Image (spheres, rainbow, N blue to C red):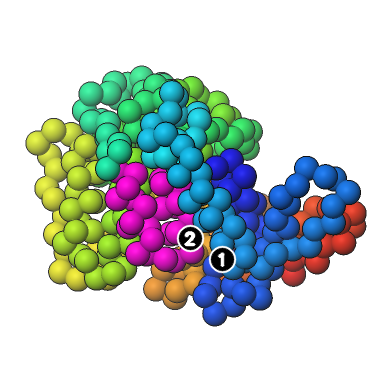
């Protein structure tokens, strides 16, 4: 489980988004399967990386108990959940649904946000009912004291959406900072694990992409019912899978904010013109833009790793 999880995150950072037509030739990461530091490894293809990640997780699911003692440890449920995540980035939507079904059959708990204190600076407890796998990452640049929420994103949360109060806190200058951390603390230690909400969103997107609009929206409405103030939520009804996909992707961005997934999502969604995004920032009067499918979406491999390992560098 841990090897697969780490391979996955490394691949998301140092490899391109999965494309079936080129995955067998696109360069991913070296798959080091031995602790022997004298062993020489070359970069495997993206297809080979996904195959190894998935087979590792499938083996783990056979070896683990359905639920572990604590969510910091792998178990069958969070292994299925991770498989649903990996399958989503591989664009294997039948696999997404199958493993999301399996994970949610073991644990489908959702927190009713009406039960939380919206005025609290730390509204979520660690290892809460939604946490399938608990993990954190330290990102000092994203600490609440320095990171400001995009006004465009903040305005997407409706007034009756409790996430608007539970996720954000106003600053003195009128901007907003993030406080909705499932790590149970404020600061630079951000929750990067897996929740039942993410698995529901994985399945909803997979269903929408398979033209199962009614089922997709049922999953999304199940989630949002627990996010809006009691009595205020009207289930969303759409007429086709394209409209369903649009609203599901919007809610995915809003629900999984500061989980370490947005960069990965941008990479895969940029493959389609309908869901691509150009990121722009203006600093000191100069505007900088990151275009869809730019080489900058694939991080350069550290130079010492390239030199010592004889690895091929990513194009810039």
Residue 89: assigned label:
2
Identity of the residue drawn at 36% across and 19% down: 120
Identity of the residue drawn at 50% across and 29% down: 72
- Left/right placement of residue 55 relative to residue 236 reads right
Whether pointer 2 and pointer 1 mark residues with C-beta atoms closer than 8 Å, the reply is yes
List x then y, in percent, for residue 298.
66, 62
| Camera-nearest residue between 178 and 72 | 72
* Figure quadrant of residue 213: bottom left
| Camera-nearest residue between 110 and 59 | 59
Identity of the residue drawn at 33% across and 62% down: 206
The residue that mark 1 highlights is: 17
List x then y, in percent, for residue 205.
32, 60
The magenta span reads 80-104
- Left/right placement of residue 178 relative to residue 247 reads right
| Camera-nearest residue between 39 and 131 | 39
Q: Is residue 85 magenta?
A: yes
| Camera-nearest residue between 70 and 138 | 70
List x then y, in percent, for residue 54.
52, 56
**Is the residue marked by circle 1 packed among few (<14), some (14-19), or many (20+) residues within 10 Å?**
many
One can see residue 304 in this view: no
Which secondary structure type mostly characterizes the magenta part of the structure?
Answer: helix
Identity of the residue drawn at 23% across and 31% down: 112
Question: What is the C-alpha distance between the residues marked 2 and 1?
Answer: 8 Å
* Figure quadrant of residue 115: top left
| SS under mark 2 | helix
Residue 195 position (above or below residue 181): below
Q: Is residue 237 magenta?
A: no
One can see residue 26 in this view: yes
Residue 278 position (above or below residue 117): below
Residue farthest toward the bottom in the current orientation of the protein:
21
């Amino acid at each position: 489980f841990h090897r697969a999880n780490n391979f996955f995150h490394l691949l998301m950072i140092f490899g391109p988004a999965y494309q079936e037509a080129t995955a067998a030739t696109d360069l991913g990461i070296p798959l080091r399967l031995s602790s022997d530091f004298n062993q020489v490894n070359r970069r495997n293809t993206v297809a080979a990386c996904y195959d190894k990640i998935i087979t590792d997780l499938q083996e783990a699911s056979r070896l683990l108990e359905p639920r572990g003692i604590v969510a910091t440890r792998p178990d069958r449920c969070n292994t299925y959940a991770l498989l649903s995540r990996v399958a989503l980035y591989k664009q294997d939507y039948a696999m997404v649904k199958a493993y999301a079904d399996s994970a949610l059959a073991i644990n489908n708990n959702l927190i009713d946000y009406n039960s939380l204190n919206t005025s609290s600076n730390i509204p979520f407890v660690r290892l809460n009912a939604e946490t399938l796998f608990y993990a954190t990452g330290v990102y000092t640049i994203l600490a609440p004291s320095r990171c400001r929420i995009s006004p465009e994103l903040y305005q997407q949360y409706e007034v009756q959406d409790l996430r608007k109060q539970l996720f954000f806190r106003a600053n003195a200058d009128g901007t907003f900072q993030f406080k909705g951390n499932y790590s149970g603390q404020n600061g630079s230690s951000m929750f990067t694990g897996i929740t039942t909400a993410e698995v529901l969103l994985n399945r909803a997107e997979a269903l929408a992409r398979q033209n199962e609009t009614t089922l997709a929206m049922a999953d999304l409405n199940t989630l949002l019912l627990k996010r809006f103030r009691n009595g205020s939520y009207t289930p969303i009804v759409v007429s086709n899978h394209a409209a369903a996909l649009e609203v599901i992707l919007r809610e995915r961005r809003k629900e999984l904010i500061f989980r370490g997934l947005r960069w990965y999502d941008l990479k895969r969604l940029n493959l389609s013109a309908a869901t691509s995004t150009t990121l722009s920032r203006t600093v000191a009067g100069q505007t900088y833009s990151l275009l869809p499918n730019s080489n900058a979406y694939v991080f350069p491999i550290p130079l010492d790793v390239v030199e010592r390992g004889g690895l091929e560098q990513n194009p810039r």
